Image (tube, grey):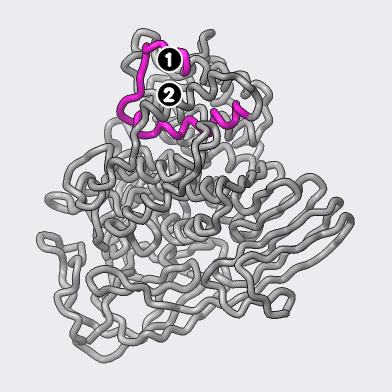
């Protein structure tokens, strides 16, 4: 495998629309969760009496790189206080989680794997020289407990065994201790073999199981890539084989798989958990870094530019637990839930709709995407995800000016003190590619830069709109990495209240989105006009989308799902037109909070 390395938050910085997106995140829930949410503010991880398992590590996993990417001194200091408290609480034998010694044998050690990953993130951002030793003692203690039988992997730890390899790979680069490789083998031997679970993914049930849990599966995709080197195993692209099965039986138009909360089949009205979006992105980032296979970077784009912004409010103070591709309302179901294993408010925008894991975990998505923009191997720098960023590392300065994915122009401004090779990944959907105005034909561009060279490289291409076939004879409109939806106007209904000692008040209260415009349409033409409007202060704005498509539609008798007034039917009752042709604007999926994404062609 060709291994690529990540730059640190000191070397790679956001700019342009990406910096605005991260700033919105810092000013929203991510940057304030420790002030307003008891599970972080009063966590047992820092000596409090609130949750002391996954929520603080989940939050730190995104809050730390966000703070350092934005060079926000207040956030950096707050992150440091949490890390200081966690480090100070580590026991002499290396145990680090907030769990008393007598309860360790029954403690689900998924938390050990998670906090160990967070500590690697913190080191890469802060270069705190305490961290390698803290990690060494944490994982050595974990090895001792597993090898002597005091603990064993079960439940979440058993299904997320591979998460420990971020720390193990970190340690293996610094220490040549045999126990590190032995621990890697123990984790795999006690962990779940997902290739044995495939048949369970083909017929989703209204049953909660770890085998079909969507977040487990999204984390799992990276398992072979991150573990095979330390285990001495041959890489077989297991992720592709398992992903194909998941997609065939549970795929969505934006590269996700349905999971509300477990796999939910092929349906535009089943949901996908936000944690799964964040973890799928992270898996794809690592798969591309460990393999160099461009398919993972392209898939990462689709999820990041569609699924991620769609399920978080413009101000990033609220989010959904579940998003649906055909989502005509976000209103509490008055009776039983539509979702297989989630409650009747999981699709509302709020502080912690249904469950609080996503409240903490969605924070990692944008910062880690930023840190995936450029990667390197030796003297080769790879432009992996073309988002606006600035790289300053080892005498190499690169500024990427772009409004991609809303526009298809990339301008690389390079000033280097050393010779290196810049490689630019070109998406498979790029058409009419030019480099500095000259036609080019390549899936990857390569430029050799000399020491002392100052150079500007402009890469441009076109993207064509296309109809993607979906199940049940429905279609989705896609243009480049962006999926487009018919937006539905809505009214927000705000709810402020306290439940189980968790206060919800503006701006981190709950909202229902009540539809105020027609949604029952079919496409009447396969031609679309692209209109570019420029990127506003809110890059994925639901009011001022940066790009739209003009489309022709006609009303049809779609109907609602049996037993529900605020859910469209899975399949339209009829595709016969009921009126004259209308011209509408299609919005990027990520900008359309209420939307119809899978539509029929009218007969």
The residue nearer to you, when weighing 372 against 292, is 292
Residue drawn at 59 percent across, 40 percent down: 65
Q: Which quarter of the figure has residue 514?
A: bottom left
For mark 2, does the 10 Å Cα neighbourhood hold few (<14), some (14 to 19), or many (20 or more) residues? Answer: some
First of labels 2, 1 by sequence position: 1
- Residue 291 is left or right of residue 16, and the answer is left
Question: Which range is magenta?
Answer: 143-172
Q: Position of residue 41 (x, y in %)?
A: 45, 29
- Gap in Å between the C-alphas at discs 2 and 1? 8 Å
Q: Is residue 278 visible?
A: yes
- Dividing the image into 4 quarters, which one contains the C terminus? bottom left
180 versus 31 height, above or below:
above
The residue nearer to you, when weighing 105 against 173, is 173
The label number, if any, that marks residue 382 in the structure image: none
436 versus 239 height, above or below:
below
Q: Are marks 2 and 1 in contact (CB under 8 Å)?
A: yes
Residue drawn at 39 percent across, 62 percent down: 254
285 versus 295 height, above or below:
above
The residue nearer to you, when weighing 124 against 46, is 124
For mark 1, does the 10 Å Cα neighbourhood hold few (<14), some (14 to 19), or many (20 or more) residues? Answer: some
The label number, if any, that marks residue 186 in the structure image: 2
The label number, if any, that marks residue 147 in the structure image: 1
Q: Is residue 231 magenta?
A: no
């Amino acid at each position: 495998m060709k291994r690529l390395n990540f730059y640190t938050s000191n070397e790679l910085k956001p700019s342009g629309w990406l910096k605005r997106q991260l700033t919105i995140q810092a000013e929203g829930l991510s940057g304030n969760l420790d002030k307003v949410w008891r599970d972080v503010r009063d966590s047992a991880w820092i000596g409090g009496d609130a949750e002391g398992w996954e929520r603080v590590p989940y939050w730190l996993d995104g809050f730390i790189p966000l703070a350092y990417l934005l060079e926000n001194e207040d956030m950096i200091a707050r992150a440091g206080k949490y890390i200081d408290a966690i480090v100070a609480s580590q026991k002499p034998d290396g145990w680090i989680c907030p769990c008393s010694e007598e309860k360790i044998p029954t403690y689900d050690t998924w938390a050990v794997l998670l906090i160990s990953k967070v500590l690697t993130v913190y080191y890469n951002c802060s270069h705190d020289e305490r961290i390698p030793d803290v990690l060494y003692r944490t994982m050595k203690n974990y090895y001792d407990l597993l090898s002597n039988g005091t603990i064993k992997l079960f439940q979440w730890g058993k299904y997320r065994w591979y998460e420990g390899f971020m720390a193990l790979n970190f340690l293996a680069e610094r220490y040549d201790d045999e126990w590190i490789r032995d621990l890697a083998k123990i984790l795999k031997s006690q962990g779940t073999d997902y290739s044995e679970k495939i048949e369970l993914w083909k017929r989703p049930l209204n049953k909660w199981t770890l085998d079909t849990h969507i977040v487990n599966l999204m984390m799992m995709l990276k398992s072979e890539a991150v573990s095979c080197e330390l285990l001495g195993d041959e890489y077989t692209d297991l992720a592709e084989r398992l992903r194909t099965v998941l997609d065939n039986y549970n795929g969505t138009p934006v590269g996700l798989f349905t999971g509300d909360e477990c796999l939910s089949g092929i349906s535009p009205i089943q949901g996908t958990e936000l944690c799964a979006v964040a973890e799928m992105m992270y898996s794809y980032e690592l798969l591309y870094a460990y393999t160099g296979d461009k398919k993972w970077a392209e898939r990462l784009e689709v999820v990041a530019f569609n699924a991620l912004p769609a399920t978080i409010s413009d101000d990033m103070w609220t989010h959904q637990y579940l998003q649906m591709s055909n989502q005509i309302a976000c209103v509490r179901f008055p009776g039983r839930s539509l979702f297989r294993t989630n409650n009747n408010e999981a699709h509302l925008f709020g502080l912690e709709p249904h469950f609080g894991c996503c409240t903490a975990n969605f924070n990692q998505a944008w910062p880690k995407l930023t840190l995936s923009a450029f990667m390197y191997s030796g003297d080769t720098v790879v432009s992996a995800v073309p988002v606006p960023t600035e790289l300053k590392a080892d005498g190499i300065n690169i500024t990427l000016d772009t409004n991609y994915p809303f526009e298809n122009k990339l301008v690389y401004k390079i000033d280097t003190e050393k010779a290196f090779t810049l490689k630019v990944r070109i998406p498979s959907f790029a058409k009419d590619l030019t480099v500095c105005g000259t036609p080019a034909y390549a899936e990857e561009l390569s430029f050799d830069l000399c020491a002392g060279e100052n150079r500007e490289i402009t890469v441009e291409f076109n993207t064509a709109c296309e109809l993607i076939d979906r199940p049940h004879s429905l279609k989705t409109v896609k243009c480049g990495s962006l999926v487009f939806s018919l937006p539905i106007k809505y009214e927000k209904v705000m709810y402020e209240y306290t439940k189980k000692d968790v206060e919800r008040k503006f701006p981190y209260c709950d909202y229902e989105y009540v539809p105020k415009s027609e949604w029952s349409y079919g496409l009447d033409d396969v031609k679309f006009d692209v209109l570019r409007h420029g990127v506003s202060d809110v890059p994925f704005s639901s009011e001022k989308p940066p790009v739209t498509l003009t489309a022709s539609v006609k009303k049809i008798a779609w109907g609602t799902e049996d037993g529900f007034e605020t859910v469209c039917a899975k399949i339209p009752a009829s595709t016969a037109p009921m009126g004259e042709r209308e011209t509408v604007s299609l919005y990027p999926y990520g900008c359309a909070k209420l939307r119809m994404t899978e539509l029929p062609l009218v007969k």
